[in-house]
Amino acid sequence: MLNTTTSPKDTQDSFFLPDFCNVRMVFALVVVGELLAFILVLSPFKNSTDPWGDLSIISLFIQWVALSSAAALCTARPFLQKLEEKVAATLSYLISLMVTLLLTEAAFWLMQYFNFYVSISPDWHLDLILQNLMISAIVNAVTLRYFYIQHQWKRHLDAESQARIQALQARIRPHFLFNSLNTIASLTRDQPALAEEAIEDLADLFRQSLADTRHQITIGEELELTRRYLGIEKLRMGDRLAVDWDIDRLPKDALIPALSIQPLMENAIYHGIEALAEGGKINITGSEAKGQISITLKNPMPAKNKAKHGNKIALDNIKSRLDAFYGAKGKVQVENKDNAYYIVNITFPYHTSQHTFQNTSQGSSQEKERK
């Protein structure tokens, strides 16, 4: 049985707040805090005789507040994730304000202890607290709103992407069904054993076709699906169909959207081999270089008057599927070489999953035992 692998999107945290335990997020907070310190010091409404001294004090305080708030939110994250978004946002906001209040009070007493700012007015303590709380309230409100909008935008993009993939996959499913059923029907009376084997292969193909579109499979699994499809077509076409596999350099644990190679193989058979009286050979090559997977299918082409016209649905679907998973890093290139060969090349990033690769190997062994 083939196994599916959860895509990276499935493992992403659904919480709207980012992970403040992450080093990159902490670095971003430090940079943003320093920019805020420069803005406060360079404000035209602030009259200071020692701007660099003020910058050092303000920077120290802002970094103190930013890192302490990040530590508090990092610690409270498991609890906040269990709450509704509005409640979690409110508590996060209050936590940040509380951290600001406590650190402002601590900073005030430290300045008193070390005799900073000797000339202090009676209301300076209260003014300091109100000023810092107001700045913190505005900055935290804007920041939380930004995180929430960004989270909703990502969710919208994910939902739109999944809807596209589901629609494309629904269009691919009937693509190989018609020919397969015809082949099985022709074998039912004369060769029932082969028909039963073909039905089992078709069942595995449909099991993968009906799988959750948010999952990918390994290239090893996709190639196994392709071989099962070829087994069905081989029963129908016999010696007219030959396939040359050059995939030793192809990492079998690389992830790929399901049904990305099989439709290309079907196109090669339907538009190439099937239209040739003598049949022909399909060449499939694969390799990996610099983190990019490349898979190429090459098939002979019939004369123009014998060629079958298609609407390129399979190619368009695969292009869209690669685009949905990999963006601009997933590509499909087509070449018509001297009107004699049709060449399709797909490239996409190399991502792996060791767990899936082990399951694939087990599945392949089980399949060999079954046969």
Image (cartoon, grey):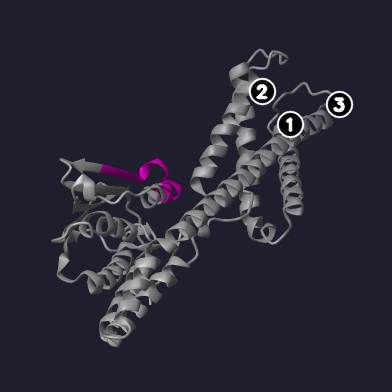
Q: Secondary structure at mark 2?
A: helix
Q: Residue flagged by tag 1: what amino acid is it?
A: Ile
Image x and y of residue 111, in percent: 70, 32
Q: Which residues are magenta?
A: 320-334
Closer to viewer: mark 2 or mark 3: 2
* Magenta segment includes 352: no
How far apart marks 2 and 3 lie (CA) works out to: 23 Å
**In the foreground, 268 or 364:** 268
Mark earlier in primary sequence (3, 1): 3
Tell me the residue that label 2 is attached to. 40
Kindly check if marks 1 and 2 are in contact, taking CB atoms under 8 A apart as contact: yes
Q: Secondary structure at mark 3?
A: loop
Residue at coordinates 33% horizontally, 77% vertically from top-left?
184
| Tag nearer the camera, 3 or 1 | 1
Amino acid marked by disc 3: Pro
What's under tag 2, amino acid-wise? Answer: Leu
Q: Circle 3 sits on which residue?
A: 122
Q: Which residue is tagged 1? A: 135
Q: Position of residue 212 (x, y in %)?
A: 50, 64
Occupied quadrant, residue 327: top left
Name the image quarter holding the N terminus.
bottom left
Q: Earlier in the sequence, mark 2 or mark 3?
A: 2
- In this rendering, the count of numbered labels is 3
Q: Residue 29 got which mark?
A: none
Residue 185: give x, y in percent of width and height. Answer: 35, 78
* Vertical side of 164 occupied by 364: above or below: below
Left or right: residue 154 compared with residue 248 = right
State the image coordinates of residue 123 (x, y, percent, origin top left): 86, 27
| Camera-side residue of 126 and 166 | 166
Label 2 crowding class (10 Å Cα cut-off): few <14, some 14-19, many 20+?
Answer: some
x 68%, y 41%: residue? 144
